[in-house]
DNA sequence: ACCGGAGCTTTCACTGAGTGGAAGCCGGTG
DNA sequence: CACCGGCTTCCACTCAGTGAAAGCTCCGGT
């Protein structure tokens, strides 16, 4: 082949999938090629194969989209739909009791990924999307996941600049380090206006034999918040789910 | 290469993903190789690349599972999570009014795929799984999707043997053909004990400019069922969603 | 301690699947 | 009607990928 050496076929195919994002879920051939950093003919051939299998779909407009077949396969991810299926009843209970937003997230590398969300119609609007990512150092779920992450992960997050979302976001590595110790000690995390100035979240860990695998949280309007009352509810939900994971 | 000619790298990678199923979401290297019909070293190398990217994950037990990254990408599928996000509020309304099972499905080839389901805790238990597949000729959603599918799809389904689930399942092509005509005429489908002897479902189409893209249904206990009362509710939900898709 | 076997990983010489520049095609636009 | 942007096809070149075989690492049995 003439292809630039050191780039495998598989990595090219995966680069095509990487090109899609929540902000641009439909791409033309040229956009796809540009985002994947690959020559047009290459993308054309690889994409055709993906369409034939169902990993991509091509609309009447010629744009490529993620195909249903890939969604089906993705739904087999134990940490995706698997976790969701297990957690949903508990999340619904939490919603029935509080009528606030309930969120479920896991850590992936140095970010968190939202697995499921029950958005109370009368609760604070939250900007998160199922399948979306977010930084670990601001949200309640993020703090819980970070506090129980391997030390090397914590150090990597602490070493990088901590993005500021509001004036209350913790951006000082020292303070964050102390905050994480508190989270481990008390068994839950409170993020008070650290993401948006109207919201407060209370989060608790979900443990499996191999450690903390996910976190669950309630997100409530700041002024209406009573963290002391909410913490036991969230912690209980976390414990119920932990028990289900053994 | 020495590889059996006519089999592309991409097709091998996709064969690996195909090897996973709801019944076996975790596979050892050898199982993976056997199911994909590929030599062990090949699978070893390709799987390693998929793990590096996050499409697969490898547990402490050495088994491969679908990775969270693939779930994330899959969640960008317009007909998967995209459709779900849009439909969920309406499905919840339908649930609030009826407290019965609400299902959302699309057609993929000659089967249907369940996109979302609200399982009423006191409603009939249904055997469907989000991300799962089912035949088109028995369920309410299936009949709606089949009735509005391209003619060649209908003919393929009618030509193949129609699997029987209960004594009321329609297995005669002629009867099914008439049933589909009825569904198109009245605008909804009723499947009365055609999947299990305890359940009845009422389904309605969801239309986009390009045609019927999905179906929504209520599944209720057979003895408690009042199709005449339910049909307007389900049809209204379908219409609301159709309007949202323009 | 030794053996055998099942499952995973690595090696290595060979080769055709994949590459990408270039050229063709198609539909819209000044 | 020439131009342009985006898509598709062609084709000669070559290296990424292959898979048989050998090596490795745990087992459990004797």
Image: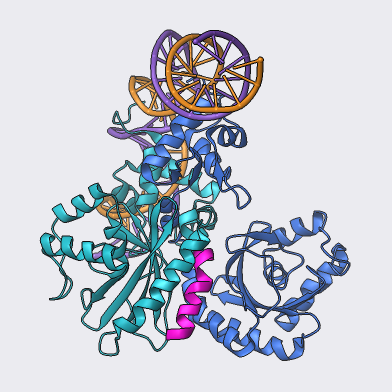
Chain colours: A cyan, B blue, C purple, D orange
Taking A29 as reference, is B177 above or below it? below
Count of numbered marks:
0
Magenta region, residue range:
A84-98
Q: Residue at x 19, y 51 (%)?
A: A155
Quarter assignment of residue B180: bottom right
In-front residue for pair A237/B183: A237
Q: Main secondary structure of the magenta part?
A: helix
Taking A246 as reference, is A191 above or below it? below
In percent of width and height, residue D24 lies at 42, 18
Q: Residue at x 74, y 62 (%)?
A: B154
In percent of width and height, residue A152 lies at 23, 47
Q: Residue at x 32, y 75 (%)?
A: A202
**Left or right placement of residue B68 versus residue B95 in this view:** left
Quarter assignment of residue B38: top right
In percent of width and height, residue A242 lies at 46, 62
In-front residue for pair A169/B60: B60
Quarter assignment of residue B137: bottom right
On the question of residue B220 being in view, the answer is yes
In-front residue for pair A32/A10: A10
On the question of residue A127 being in view, the answer is no
In percent of width and height, residue B99 lies at 63, 85
Confirm whether the magenta stretch covers residue B74: no
Confirm whether the magenta stretch covers residue A96: yes
């Amino acid at each position: 082949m003439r292809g630039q050496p050191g780039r495998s076929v598989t990595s090219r195919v995966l680069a095509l999938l990487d090109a899609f994002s929540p902000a641009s879920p439909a791409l033309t051939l040229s956009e796809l090629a540009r985002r994947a950093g690959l020559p047009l003919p290459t993308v054309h051939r690889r994409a055709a194969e993906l369409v034939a299998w169902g990993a991509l779909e091509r609309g009447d407009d010629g744009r490529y989209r993620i195909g249903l077949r890939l969604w089906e396969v993705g739904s087999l991810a134990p940490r995706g739909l698997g976790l969701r299926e297990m957690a949903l009843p508990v999340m619904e209970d939490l919603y029935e009791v509080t009528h606030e937003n309930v969120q479920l997230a896991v850590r992936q590398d140095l970010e968190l990924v939202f697995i499921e969300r029950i958005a109370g119609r009368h609760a604070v609007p939250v900007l998160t999307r199922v399948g979306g990512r977010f930084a670990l150092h601001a949200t309640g779920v993020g703090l819980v996941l970070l506090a129980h992450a391997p030390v090397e992960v914590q150090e990597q997050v602490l070493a990088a600049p901590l993005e500021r979302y509001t004036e209350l976001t913790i951006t000082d590595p020292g303070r964050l380090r102390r905050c994480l110790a508190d989270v481990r000690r008390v068994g839950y995390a409170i993020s008070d206006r650290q993401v948006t100035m109207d919201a407060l979240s209370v989060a608790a860990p979900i443990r499996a034999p191999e450690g903390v695998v996910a976190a669950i949280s309630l997100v409530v309007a700041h002024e209406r918040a009573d963290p002391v009352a909410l913490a036991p509810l969230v912690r209980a939900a976390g414990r119920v789910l932990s028990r289900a994971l053994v």
